[in-house]
Image: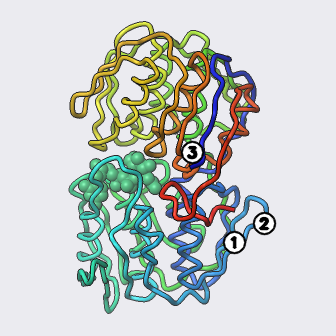
Amino acid sequence: MKNIRIRGGRPLDGTVHIQGSKNAALPMMAAAVLHRGTTVLRGCPKITDVFFMEKILEKMGAKTSWKGSSLYLDCSSLENTDIPDQYACRMRCSVILLGALLGRFGRGAIAPPGGCVIGDRPVDLHLDLLKTMGTHIEKEQGSLKAYTPSLRGSVFRFGKQSVGATEHGMIAAVLAEGTTCLENCAREPEISWLAEFLNNMGASVTGAGTKRIQIRGVKALHDSVFEVPPDRIVAGTYICAAAATRGKIRIENPPLTELSAFLGVYSKMGGQYDSVGGKLIADGSRAWGPVTRLETDVYPGFPTDLQSPVMAVLSLARGKSHIRENIFEDRFRVAEDLVRMGAHIRINGRDAYIDGAQRLRGCRVRAQELRGGAALILAGLAAEGETTVEGLGFVERGYEHIQEDICSLGGEVVVEGSLPVNSNEEDTVKR
Ligand code: UD1
């Protein structure tokens, strides 16, 4: 078990550079499969989920390498169309590889995909979309086997806005015959970035960022280089860390527009921010205000991925807050550990009622998933005494160097232990 030990009570103060976005990089890596050549992702985050995806691509026959923070993906000799179970079942977004494989080879197989334990997380929309585009899908020995003579451009309306399914549709349609029109699409920034990435490879995608995306199928793609934009969730997490410790941080490369809903809530808490010359200064020294009602929503609403970090901050507020989680039904697991640290939180289904405790005390707690784990680290930074957060591997799925970042901001943290072989937290692919 890999743990992080935190000595709390120090306001954070310093400058941080935000890593490339996890949720942008992963679908781009999957989309690289479409091209018989090389795709380079500059500023790709070195996080476990990226290493998982890299390992999957290698197992399928791709050649991958790193030069600094640039990830080179050469998929010219990729031929194995079975997505290895060992990794796929750990990472939910691996399902979108199926669309890329179908686009390039007309076949693909995957075990039911996994991911963080934050709810049911079905893949019905993904499969319905592929079926509409002319794919036959069969369940065989617990695996989904998909094949198509050729994907055909279609009109598909998502019954519900889904980030992953929208990305899947875009990727599947790139090499399909004719034009695909996706309706009721999610509008998250990662979708617009994926469209830019695909167009940079020679695809023809328009409308990303709106509810209606059109993809005109092309015959082939070309080598490309793309810079992964900064991670809005990591940026929001560090702003929450400053707020929880009543500190002040400077972000060198803030994804400002994409943080807009979060910054609105941060302002309600009393957090102040200023953008100067493209940098963001977030002063959380007075961020003790409660938020009477906060609801997570699809973009441009408040992101579910920042709900747990904000809950940690609201646990320290001077008053009562209410959070409603509209995206994932089981995303309040962290509350139990926050309560152990002295927070006053009552959960009722999708609602969390938080009576600001104003102070937390350090103790031993356990990360159960990525963002909840990050929230516990924030709580530890603000708490009196020492906190040990077990299960740092969950956090490393999405945060590239959380220990170094916190230390550079003046926080006191030490990483202890290592991961056992076959750990569920992480895999041995980390390098
Ligand atoms: C992505 C992000 C994740 C973020 C989430 C919501 C990545 C790698 N992950 O996850 O960090 O928390 O968006 O912003 O980008 N749903 C269905 N059927 C489906 C697909 C989804 O019912 O086939 C439901 C889900 O259960 C959930 C909702 O739709 O309730 C939204 O999920 P979705 O947007 O698909 O999330 P992900 O793409 O998995």
Indicate the position of residue 125 as horizontal and vertical percent values.
Answer: 26, 63
Q: Earlier in the sequence, mark 2 or mark 3?
A: 2
What crowding class fits label 3: few (fewer than 14 Cα within 10 Å), some (14-19), or many (20 or more)? many
In whole angstroms, how far apart are the C-alphas of marks 3 and 1? 27 Å
Indicate the position of residue 415 as horizontal and vertical percent values.
Answer: 68, 41
- Above or below residue 54? Residue 314 is above
Q: Quadrant of residue 147?
A: bottom left
In whole angstroms, how far apart are the C-alphas of marks 1 and 2? 8 Å
Frontmost of labels 3 and 1 is 3
Task: Please give the label number shown on residue 72.
Answer: 1
The answer to whether 22 appears left or right of 430 in the picture is left
Element at badge 1? strand
For the point 68% across and 22% down, the residue is 12
Task: Please give the label number shown on residue 424.
Answer: none
- Front in this rendered view, residue 105 or 354: 354
- Front in this rendered view, residue 394 or 79: 394
Looking at the rendered structure, the kind of residue marked 2 is Lys
What residue sits right under mark 3 in the picture?
Answer: 392
In whole angstroms, how far apart are the C-alphas of marks 2 and 3? 26 Å
Q: Earlier in the sequence, mark 3 or mark 1?
A: 1
Element at badge 3? helix
The answer to whether 142 appears left or right of 210 in the picture is left
Question: Are the residues flagged by discs 1 and 2 in contact, CB closer than 8 Å?
Answer: yes
Q: Earlier in the sequence, mark 1 or mark 2?
A: 2
Indicate the position of residue 380 as horizontal and vertical percent values.
Answer: 57, 26
Indicate the position of residue 225 as horizontal and vertical percent values.
Answer: 68, 67
For the point 52% across and 17% down, the residue is 361
- Above or below residue 276? Residue 138 is below
Frontmost of labels 2 and 3 is 3
Looking at the rendered structure, the kind of residue marked 3 is Leu
Q: Residue furthest bottom?
A: 149
Task: Please give the label number shown on residue 67.
Answer: 2
